[in-house]
Image (cartoon, helix red, strand yellow):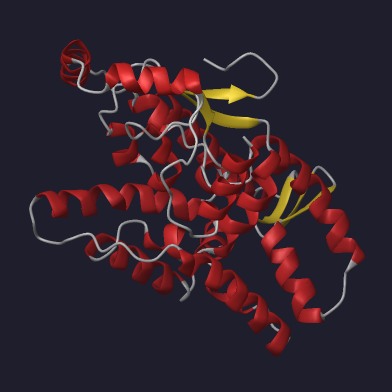
């Protein structure tokens, strides 16, 4: 289990998933049954043909994301002082909330620990430690929602063979994280905050559109015509920061090997399909495998799975329906 946990962390930093070196006896038994079993193959084809793709978790997530960002807008325009600021730094009912990556960038730029920032990040750190760091990406980040909507256009163009999806090296995101950290130290300026589509969109929604939205538009155009979800998958250091915070999160997606038909639909809809490497036939190291910390907990795989083999789970508590 410790080895599997370490592998999941390395995959988050860009390593490609590897075939497991050791598989638990109970999982080996299930793998052996599925290999070449005609009844299993027939069940797989039946499940795929009659799969009912729900949008339960997707709709919940979209509702939460829109409401959180709308709360910023309403609070500012009606001056109700409930949620002030933007996603990078805000105050909710008097409690300071500061984005972890933004706070880190500021402290690196100023080259010392700023106590007020540490206090402001405390609540945010606990929230995402409990919920799973990259939950922020799919449940709060406004760029994620736009990228998800424009992704459908990209997939349509790919289907029509008008464009091809160009995957890139996932290690670029780790390099990006260190690059922006070094730029903050070297320039004394939070360079990333100037180009972060998350911050740009949040401020534009609250205070009004600016020329920086052209950069966001350029990113979306690049993702539509060249590489699916390129910014979130290969560049954004925010996702990596929150992924590290969520390593020990009790909230996760749990995979159950026994009922899985390995039809692969979950990996097709996943923003970060490398985290679902374990669903490939013969890859699961145990009968139940928690999905790694790079998972955004978006719930698309849960909605898509025809057999319920992927579910939300709280470690140590009963599973969520």
Q: How many marks?
A: 0
Image point (40%, 16%), residue name: 258
Quadrant of res 130? top right
Q: Is residue 124 visible?
A: yes
Quadrant of res 317? top right
In the image, taking residue 200 as reference, residue 217 lies left or right, namely left
Q: Estimate the x, y position of residue 9 in percent, counting from the top left.
A: 59, 50
In the image, taking residue 232 as reference, residue 317 lies left or right, namely right
In the image, taking residue 240 as reference, residue 48 lies left or right, namely left
The one nearer the camera, 283 or 256, is 283
Q: Is residue 206 visible?
A: no
Q: Estimate the x, y position of residue 64 in percent, counting from the top left.
A: 54, 35
Q: Estimate the x, y position of residue 24 in percent, counting from the top left.
A: 51, 26
- Residue sitting at the far bottom: 187
Image point (40%, 17%), residue name: 29
Image height of 131 relative to 228, above or below: above
- Residue sitting at the far right: 115
Image quadrant holding the N terminus, namely top right
Q: Estimate the x, y position of residue 225 in percent, counting from the top left.
A: 22, 64
In the image, taking residue 126 as reference, residue 307 lies left or right, namely left
The one nearer the camera, 268 or 137, is 268
Image height of 177 relative to 126, above or below: below
The one nearer the camera, 191 or 69, is 191
Image point (28%, 33%), residue name: 264
Image point (16%, 14%), residue name: 38
- Residue sitting at the far top: 39
């Amino acid at each position: 289990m410790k080895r599997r946990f370490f592998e999941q962390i390395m995959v988050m930093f860009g390593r490609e998933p590897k075939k497991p070196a050791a598989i638990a006896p109970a999982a080996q038994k299930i793998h052996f049954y599925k290999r070449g079993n005609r009844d299993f193959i027939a069940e797989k084809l039946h499940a795929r043909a009659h799969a009912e793709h729900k949008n339960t978790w997707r709709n919940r997530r979209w509702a939460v994301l829109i409401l959180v960002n709308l709360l910023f807008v309403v609070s500012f325009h009606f001056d109700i002082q409930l949620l002030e600021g933007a996603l990078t730094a805000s105050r909710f009912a008097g409690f300071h909330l500061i984005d972890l990556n933004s706070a880190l960038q500021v402290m690196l730029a100023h080259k010392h620990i700023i106590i007020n920032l540490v206090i402001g990040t405390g609540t945010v750190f606990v929230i995402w430690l409990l919920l799973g760091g990259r939950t922020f990406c799919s449940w709060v980040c406004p760029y994620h929602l736009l990228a998800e909507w424009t992704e459908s256009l990209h997939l349509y163009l790919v289907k029509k063979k008008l464009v091809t999806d160009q995957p890139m090296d996932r290690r670029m995101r780790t390099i990006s994280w260190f690059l922006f950290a070094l730029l903050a130290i070297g320039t004394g300026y939070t360079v990333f905050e100037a180009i972060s589509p998350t911050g740009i969109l949040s401020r534009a929604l609250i205070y009004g559109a600016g020329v920086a939205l052209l950069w966001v538009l350029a990113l979306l155009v690049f993702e539509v015509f060249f590489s699916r979800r390129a910014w979130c998958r290969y560049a954004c250091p925010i996702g990596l920061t929150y992924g590290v915070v969520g390593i020990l999160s009790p909230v996760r997606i749990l995979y159950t090997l026994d009922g899985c038909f390995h039809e692969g639909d979950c990996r097709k809809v996943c923003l970060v399909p490398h985290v679902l490497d374990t669903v490939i036939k013969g890859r699961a190291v145990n009968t139940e495998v928690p999905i790694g910390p790079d998972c955004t907990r978006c719930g698309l795989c849960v909605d898509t799975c025809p057999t319920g083999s992927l579910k939300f789970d709280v470690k140590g508590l009963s599973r969520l329906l």
